[in-house]
Structure formats: structure tokens, C-alpha cells
Image (cartoon, rainbow, N blue to C red):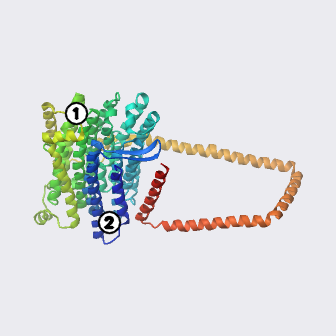
Amino acid sequence: MAFVLPLLPILFAIATAVAPRGSEDRQRFLLMGLAVGAMALTALIAAFGAANGWTGHIAWHEPLGLTAALPPLAGAMAILVPLIALPVLAYAAFHEQGRGLRRLVAILLVFVGGMELLVVAADFLTLLIGWELVGVCSYLLIAHEWRERENTASSLYAFLMTRFGDLGLFAAAMAVFSVTGSFSYGGLAAMEGAPAIVVGFGLLLAAASKSGQIPFAPWLFRAMAGPTSVSALLHAATMVAAGAFILLRLETFLASMPGLPGAIIAVGAATALSGGIVALLQTHAKRLLAASTSAHYGLMFVAVGAGYPGVAFLHLVAHAAFKALLFLAAGLALEKTGSYDLSTMRLGRALPLAGLMTLIGAMSLAGLPPLGGGWTKEAVLTAAEHWSLWAAGAVILSGALSAAYAARFQLSAFGLPEEESEDDEDAGETAPLWPQPRARQVEIGAMVLLAVFVLFTSLLWLPPVRTSAEELLQATLPEASVATLVLSLIGVGLGLLIGTLIARQHLTFGSDGPAAEVAHWLGLPALIDAAITEPVLWLSRAAAKLDDRLIDGSVRAVALGGRGVSWILRLKGEAGAEGLAAQATGLVGIVSLATSRFGEWLTDGFVEGLAQTVGQSGRDARRLQTGFSHHYYTIATLGAGAAIILLLSLS
């Protein structure tokens, strides 16, 4: 039954692809209805399945099979994904461009389905299928506006960067299978020695690449080429969340590996600090939020390494709510100004309600009490303190940076303009708090839903709610100390002051120079190009030259030698060769006469039949190339269904 969760969004994606067309307004309403219905139904079924401990098993051929389960953390994550996706998909249906919108919504639904499969997976084979499905969907979504060459290049960069990290997951799966004879998570308890090291560090490599941790963080900037709704869903509850989720899902095994928890904390702390610095120096709204995503997933890594997966999950929940909200706000700012440049915004008077909703998300991002992000950040700090003081110090500093760039984002994007023009005054006097256009109502409505979710996470400050969360998640939450809480709040206050000063002074740090290089992930992209890209290209060019000189040269040498031998033989035995040729000609004539009728019928019939078959196949194949994506989705679905039926019949 657990496999129903990933299947539902995919079925709705098919329905979206084949739904009847109509006017633009009708089509947008239809797409929103299908997407919202799919997410609401998936969330309800996930809640029911988690409450009843659903499992699932699809046997291919022993020992291969797909297994699914909904333990507490996986069940909670299975509910979170569609809850965050619901307002994001509603926003997408009315915010994104009409061209390709049906394709976009359909792939977003498949994206959610792949994430649900990853979440419910109880073995590495199922995990790999969901993991790869999420990766492919992210590639398609980032390159949604594929007519722009830069978008396709960015999607390929992000895909290859995460694919490199995926090698760690493949290595982990193979190591588990080689030792236990199955891909089950349960086999991890039997792992020890070198295979266990491969599994542990392979999982860390895969998780770091998916969650945008150092050194893989630059791909998150390239992913900003995708539409706003794609960025919101990718950063909040799907692609980037996959890495952190798999670590907290398998934390029991990871904690048993010597040195691995410390490595997880080191990766997370380094990314939290560097991501905070990069975000603070960014002037591009979406890139600021992307660097913030890396930083906050770094905090989740710290909590997992410290032995508190429940804390990591609660911070994931709070982050999903406020980060999706802030990305949708950035999309509205782009729509209003035509640019993501923070220095051109200050839309507090033009978009007052959007500014208010954004303020709620920004306060949670900053870690201000009583917002949910404030409590979860303090919980991460307490978990880090239980590990070591240096880890706690890194979390305090990253929290201060988070407050600084949150203040800068809010004041730059939705602050009040310093000089009012007549147009601004007229807009402020006449613009209604609830905009009249239907699209704007849906966009603001989606932001309101996410803001309500952010406020809901604020209940974590109440002791009874924390106790209930511990029971539901079957996880331990650490007790905060007064000293670290005070230090953390002082850091948040200083961060807010710094962010406010940067926003008020309109500091942009320029497009070049040391600050700009730091803002572009501390020069990591240039280092990757110098250390990996350029050497690989050089080796490719060298291999091409070697191919030309060695392999092609060998062929030319053989051909030249053949011509030489032919010339020598012709000189030595021209007469003998002519006699041999005459005898061969006579023999061929006899054979040809004996088989002329039968051979002519056979060869001509074979050639003509083959030509007719190929021609008809080509005509049939051309009929399938309609150019409509929903036809292709239908064909792919029928093929997948046939494959599933075949596998079930063989099992």
C-alpha cells in the first residue's frame, strides 16, 4: 500500500498531460485543480498510511525487489512534501508563462512522486529509483525554458554535479548487496569493516551533492535558471531535501561508523558558514536564497552528525515553509520589476500584502523567536553543543549570518522606497490590499498558506507541542541551555543590525573584485573549472589527437601495405593470376546458372520485403511523433505498465 504515495502524483501528471485544452484562464484553473487535488489527496493518504504503518513490496526476481515502509520520520516527510508542494503548484499554474505550462505542471507532479518514492523506500534499490527520478525531473525543470541556451547549460551543469555525488549512493548499494545479498536497509546492521566505510562515506557523498554542500554548492546557483515555482519546490521539500533526509533516515547506522559523524558535522558547519557569507554578499534575490538553502541544510547535517535526527527533521520542516514562501516572494518581485536585482526592488508600498507575508518568512529565516525557524535553529545549536564547543560556535556564527541576509533580503525586496515618486504615492493610495487580478490573488493566496504554515511551526516553542513531536517522531530533542541561547540571540541581533546597514547603504559589492568572487561561492566554480573541467577537456583533446595519429595512422599504414603487396603480386604472377581468374569465372557461371531462378526469387523477395517492412515501420513511427507531450507521456505510461505486468508475471 505504501507505493500508492508515489503513484498518485504520477497518475495525476498523466491526467494533466492528456487533459482537454481550452482558453488560457480555463486551462490554468484546470491545471491548478488537478495539481492541488493531487497534493491534497497525497497528503491525506500519507497521513493515513503513516498512522497505520503501511508497508509495500514488489518482487521482481529474488533477491531483487522493491520495498517501502513508513516509519515515523518517513511518514512525517511523506506528509510534508505534498503540503509544501500544494501552494507552490497552485502558484505555478497562474504565475508561470502559458507556453509549456502543462508540461511544467506535469513534471512538477512527477517530481513530487519521485520524492515520495525516495521517502518511502526501505531498501537501496527503491531509493536509487526515486533518487534518479528526482534527478532527471530536476534536469528537465531547470531547463524548462530550453530555448535559452544558458538554461540548458545550467541544467546540464546541475545534473552532472549531482550525478557525480550519486556515485556514492551506487557504491553504498553495491557494498550492502555484496555483504548481505540484499539491498534492504535492515542489512546495514550487519555491515562492518571496509564495506561499512564505503556505505557510510558513500551516503555522505551522495547527500552532500544533493543538498548543495561544499564542494557541490555551486550547482544551486545554476539551478536558478529554472522558473520560480521550480526553485521553490526544489529547495524546500524535494531535490535538495533528499540529501538531508537520507542521512537522518539512516542516522542509526551512520552514528556507529567511527569518524563519520565528525565528517558530517565538518561538512555541514563549513557549508553553513560559507553559505552565510555568500548569501550576505549576493545582490541577486534567488541566488541569495539559494546560498541560504545550502547554509541551512548544513545546519541539518550538523544536527544529524551530533546524533539528533529529530532536530534535523524539524529544522527541515521549518526551512521548507519559510524558504518556499521567500522564493514565491522573489517571483512576485521579478514580475513587478523585471529583475532579481535587490537594488531595484523596495516593493513594500507596491505589494503590501506580499511584503507582510515575506516578513513572516524572513523573521523565521533570521531565527527570531517566536517563529518556528528560531526554535529549530536553537535546537540545532543545543545539539551541536552536546558534540563540541567549536560546532556550537559555528552554529552561532551561521545563525548571525542568517539573520543578516534575512534582514537584507526583506528590506531590499519589500522595504519602503526612500524617495516617493508621484506614481508610488498614487499606487499606495489606490492599490487595494487584496489585488483584483485573478492570477495575483492565487499568487498571494499561495504565500498566505505558506505563511500560515510558518506560524504553525512556531508552536514548537510550547513544551506540550515539543513533547508531542518527540512521541510522534520517536526522537529525542535536546534541552537548551540558557548561556548558549543568550549568545545565539546576541548573534541574531548583531546579524540583523549588519543586514539592515547593508540594505540601507545599498551595498552591492560590485560585479568583480574579491567580494564578487566570494559572492560566487568563494571562487569554487573557478577552482572546479581549473582542477576538473580544464584537465578533462585537455585529456579529451589529447585522446582525439592520439586517435588521429595512432588508430587512423594504423589503418592508413595497413591500406598502404595492402596496395604494395597487390602491386608486387601483379608483377610476379600476372599470367597465373589471369588463369586463376578464368577458372573462378567459369565455376561462378555454373553455380549462377543452377541457382538463377531460386536465387533471384529469394534475394529479390528478401530485399523487397525488407524494404516494405522498413517503410511501413517508418510510416507507423512517424504517426507517433505528434509533437504533443501528452501523447509521449501516454506512450511512456503504457510501456511502463507493460513492463510492470511482465515483471509481476515473472515474479
Give, as a three-letter code, the residue at label 2: Gly
Picture disc at residue 383: 1
129 horizontally vs 234: left or right: right
Residue located at (80% from left, 49% from top): 567
Which structural element holds mark 1?
helix
72 horizontally vs 368: left or right: right
Task: Say if residue 272 shows up in the picture.
Answer: no
Query: Mark 1 Cα within 10 Å, few/some/many (few <14, many 20+)?
Result: many
Rendered location of residue 123, percent (x, y): 39, 41
Q: Nearer the viewer, residue 615 or 335?
A: 615
Q: Nearer the viewer, residue 346 or 286?
A: 286
Residue located at (87% from left, 57% from top): 582
Rendered location of residue 537, percent (x, y): 48, 44
Q: Nearer the viewer, residue 277 or 138?
A: 138
Task: Say if residue 479 shows up in the picture.
Answer: yes
Q: Nearer the viewer, residue 613 or 364?
A: 613
Query: Mark 2 Cα within 10 Å, few/some/many (few <14, many 20+)?
Result: some
Picture disc at residue 22: none
Residue located at (43% from left, 31% from top): 195
Q: Where is 338 relative to 290, above or below?
A: below
Nearer the camera: disc 1 or disc 2: 1
Give, as a three-letter code, the residue at label 1: Ala
Quickly name the residue at label 2. 98
Q: Where is 632 relative to 357, above or below?
A: below
386 horizontally vs 234: left or right: left
Which structural element holds mark 2?
loop
86 horizontally vs 114: left or right: left
Earlier sequence position, callout 1 versus callout 2 = 2
Rendered location of residue 548, percent (x, y): 61, 46
C-alpha separation, residue under disc 1 versus residue under disc 2: 47 Å
Q: Residue furthest bottom?
A: 23
